[in-house]
């Protein structure tokens, strides 16, 4: 089991959002038993407080509950207890390094480094109120983190039960962790496959059992093939 601790300043906005976004992703992809995911603060300012209401509302708008989460401060024992300690910005990284006297086991990371954006910080909504930008950054970072943890293993998309074209996109939304804003069109699919965080990933495509879906599936398979994304 891989144990992950997300960290931010107060543990009421960005790090709990990251915690529950990734928990939702591993649940949706059938990997929940492979991970322990938590979050903590670098300060004592918000200890015992629940997730900040706008952050709760943003999660809830995507069907994600953070019920029962209260802010806690990271402890020295967390370095040994977790496999990865992931900060939201450079200040978080500095605080982690300072608290643990360095990073002898290479456990401390910046989330967006996994998406090929070294040094880029997760947007902090505390001062701006822009929780959408935070959500967008966390989607990119958490998908890239999960892809990195899954290594080179192809992502399996099982279309066998699909009966209509819309079902194909439902399978892709679940297996590729699409945001709901993506439309059901092949142009968007090509853009998703050739951009971060899916660039370079390979997919195993299981065709529909319904023969009437063959034409729609072949058009979809061609997009994956043209993007160099078929395992």
Image: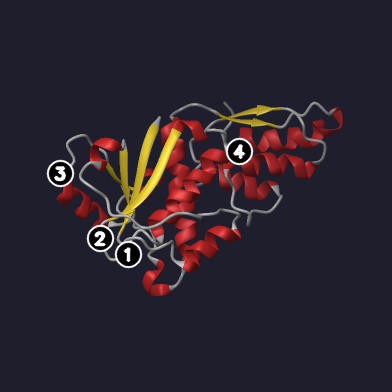
Task: Classify 66 as above or below 77.
Answer: below
| The label number, if any, that marks residue 43 in the structure image | 2
Which label lies toward us, 4 or 3? Answer: 3
Residue 158 to residue 192: above or below: above
Q: Say which residue appears at 54% left-offset and 31% top-offset.
A: 202
Mark sitting earlier along the chain (3/2): 2
How would you rate the neighbour count of disc 3 (Cα within 10 Å): few for under 14, some for 14-19, many for 20 or more?
some
Q: Are marks 3 and 2 in contact (CB under 8 Å)?
A: no
Residue 45 pos. (x, y %): 28, 66
- Judging by the rendered image, the residue that carries numbered circle 1 is 46
Q: Secondary structure at mark 3?
A: loop
The quadrant where residue 121 appears: bottom left
Q: CA distance from mark 2 to mark 1?
A: 8 Å
Q: Residue 102 shows which numbered tag?
A: 3
Compared with 66, 168 (above or below) is above
Which residue, given by chain and number where applicable, does mark 4 sit on? 175
Rendered location of residue 36, percent (x, y): 41, 38
Foreground disc of the pair 4, 2: 2
Residue extending furthest bottom?
Answer: 128
Q: Quick one: label 1 or label 3, which is nearer the N terminus?
A: 1
Q: Is residue 9 visible?
A: yes
Between circles 3 and 2, the one closer to the viewer is: 2
Q: Are marks 2 and 1 in contact (CB under 8 Å)?
A: yes
Residue 177 versus residue 194: which sits nearer the camera? 177
Real-space Cα separation, disc 4 to disc 2, in angstroms: 36 Å
């Amino acid at each position: 089991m891989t144990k992950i601790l997300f960290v931010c300043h107060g543990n009421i906005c960005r790090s709990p959002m990251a915690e529950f976004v990734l928990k939702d992703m591993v649940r949706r992809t059938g990997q929940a038993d492979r991970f322990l995911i938590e979050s903590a603060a670098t300060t004592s300012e918000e200890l015992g407080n629940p997730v900040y209401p706008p952050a709760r509302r943003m999660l809830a708008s995507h069907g994600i509950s953070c019920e029962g989460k209260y802010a806690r401060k990271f402890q020295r024992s967390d370095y040994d207890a977790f496999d990865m300690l992931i900060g939201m910005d450079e200040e978080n990284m500095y605080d982690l390094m300072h608290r643990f006297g360095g990073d002898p086991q290479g456990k401390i990371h910046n989330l967006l480094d996994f998406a090929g954006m070294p040094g880029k910080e997760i947007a902090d909504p505390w001062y701006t109120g822009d929780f959408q930008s935070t959500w967008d950054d966390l989607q990119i970072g958490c998908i890239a983190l999960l892809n990195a943890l899954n290594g080179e293993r192809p992502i399996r998309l099982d279309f066998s039960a699909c009966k209509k074209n819309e079902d194909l996109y439902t399978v892709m939304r679940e297996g590729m962790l699409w945001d709901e804003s993506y439309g059901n069109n092949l142009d968007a699919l090509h853009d998703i496959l050739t951009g971060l965080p899916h660039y370079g990933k390979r997919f195993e495509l299981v065709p529909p059992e319904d023969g009437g879906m063959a034409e729609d599936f072949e058009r979809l398979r061609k997009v994956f093939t043209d993007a160099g994304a078929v395992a």
